[in-house]
Amino acid sequence: MGDVLAGIHATWEFDDDSVLIRFERGIRTPRLLSALGERRIPHEALSSVTVGAGKRGTVVLRAVPRPGADPLTEAAAGQLRESVDPYRLVLPAEARPLAEYYAETLGAAVDAARTRRAGAGLVTDEQPGAGTPGHGTPGPDRSSGADEPAERFLVAAPEAPLSFKAYDAKASFDGRTVSFRWFRTGASSAKWKAGDQRLPVGELEGVEWHSPELFDGYLRLLPRGGPAESSGADHDPAAVVFGLGYGPVHESLPFAAAVLAAVRDAAATRVAAPVPALAPAGRRDPADVADRIRHLGELHQAGLVTDEEFTAKKTELLAEL
């Protein structure tokens, strides 16, 4: 499409297969939006498009993401305030006809993407998202059709390295490993006793983010194959707690989204590149066994094989000599 629609705090650029959302950087722009900078949203990542009345004489054009398509909204889990929703474009009330036009145009593109998925057998039991506004309706609303969850993230996650200061630790993420460095004045005795933490994404199965704007905010890493942690975040070495001025949304949420995306990527890699099969019983060439152990070590270093798996497989390989 190539059209550009400028609103309050953001500008949407409509392309043939996506929408490029650029957020302003300024003291009046919500800090989360400023931190995100810009985001490209493929049409296939959207479920519907709506137009509605905003506050103080404004109109809001909103794109609704599909479940599972965006690591940021998945990590947020519905906890974001409306004012920092990255899928809302706020316009002056007099721009409503323009908002309705783009809602109709973008909605048609979203429907076309849905049709392509249906043709490829990726959509089942769906209704089209298009709708014709009737008397008394707020405008084009293409939210009537439920959309199936995306099988993978379609929107890029914030890029590592990322870090933020929680109440009890400094959290860092380099793209492969999450690190918690405890503060002596904030960390609980349980965390201090456990020591600073380094958790490869390959050893995780998820991330839990509880907004610092809510009571008892925290970020918790969920270990792969491990039992659910029953203790509070204050005593869990795989979690950091927020507080007044600590772990703000614009820092901790992009962090959580980036970790979540890396965890999903690591899981996909494990499926695509399983641990090498063991050789048939009997003595093997020592050089061949050494190569297998070296490759196994690389998978372990990348976090794609747990400590237990590495030790067990290495023992079996050595037994072949």
Image: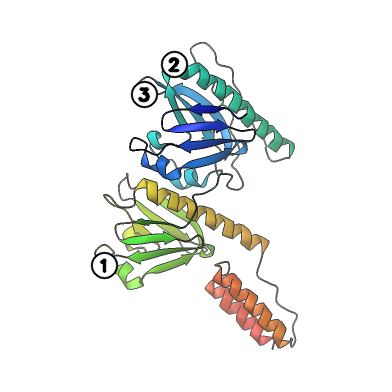
Amino acid beneath label 2: Glu
Hey, which residue is sitting farthest top in the picture? Answer: 135
Query: Is 100 above or below relative to 263?
Result: above
Could you say which is closer to the camera, residue 216 or residue 181? 181
- Residue 28: x percent and y percent? 34, 35
- Return the mark for residue 227: none
Query: Residue 184 — which label?
Result: 1
**What residue does disc 3 label?**
55
Mark 1, other Cα within 10 Å: few <14 / some 14–19 / many ≥20: few
Give the residue drawn at x 37%, y 42%. 31
Disc on the earlier residue, 3 or 2: 3
Q: Earlier in the sequence, mark 3 or mark 1?
A: 3
Query: Which residue is more in the foreground, 258 or 76?
Result: 258
Q: Are marks 2 and 1 in contact (CB under 8 Å)?
A: no
Is residue 237 visible to the viewer in this orientation of the structure? no
The label shown at residue 94 is: 2
